Image (cartoon, grey):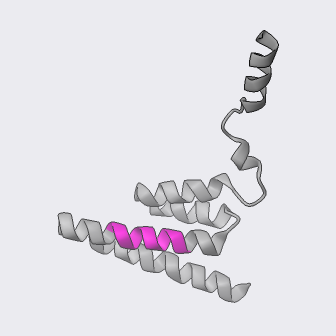
Amino acid sequence: MNRTFSKIFQEDETDGLDWYEEEDTSPFDDLFIWAILTKKFPMAYLMWQRGRQSIATALIGSRLCYKMSEIARAKYNTDAADIIMVESRFVETDSVETWRLN
């Protein structure tokens, strides 16, 4: 019984980081999204440059900024919404320029 139990759980044991070992994912892409959500735009730009899927990641970041701007404008009506909207346009412009270079 112990052998069966350990065999079942031995196959399922993972450290939770197996998905980072795939070729298509990069921790920089995840850090880019984290930096966008925490409004650390210079860090987001750096992570975007280091990431693998720069066009797709930039478009996701642009959309996140746009939605964050809408929420900030609707709830708080502050200048933060304008700043986030400017960052959204900046990220979108960079993704289009990257696409043109490829």
Along the horizontal axis of the image, is 60 left or right of 75? Answer: right
Q: In the rendered view, would you say 72 is above or below 35?
A: below
Numbered disc total: 0
In this view, the residue farthest toward the top is 2
Q: Is residue 38 magenta?
A: no
Q: Which residue is more in the foreground, 9 or 69?
A: 9
Q: Position of residue 69 (x, y in %)?
A: 32, 70
In this view, the residue farthest toward the front is 1
Q: Is residue 65 magenta?
A: yes
Prevalent SS, magenta region: helix
Q: Is residue 20 visible?
A: yes
In this view, the residue farthest toward the bottom is 100
Q: Position of residue 43 (x, y in %)?
A: 52, 58
Q: Which residue is more in the foreground, 75 or 88?
A: 75
Q: In the rendered view, would you say 11 is above or below 4?
A: below
Give the quarter of the image for residue 56: bottom right
Q: Which residue is more in the foreground, 56 or 50?
A: 56
Q: Is residue 43 visible?
A: no
Residue at image position (26%, 66%) is: 72
The magenta segment is 59-68
Q: Quadrant of the N terminus?
A: top right
Give the quarter of the image for residue 80: bottom left
Q: In the rendered view, would you say 4 is above or below 75?
A: above
Q: Quadrant of the C terminus?
A: bottom right
Residue at image position (38%, 73%) is: 66
Give the quarter of the image for residue 87: bottom left
Residue at image position (73%, 43%) is: 18
Along the horizontal axis of the image, is 39 left or right of 72? Answer: right
Q: Position of residue 13 (x, y in %)?
A: 72, 29
Q: Position of residue 68 (x, y in %)?
A: 34, 66
Residue at image position (65%, 52%) is: 27
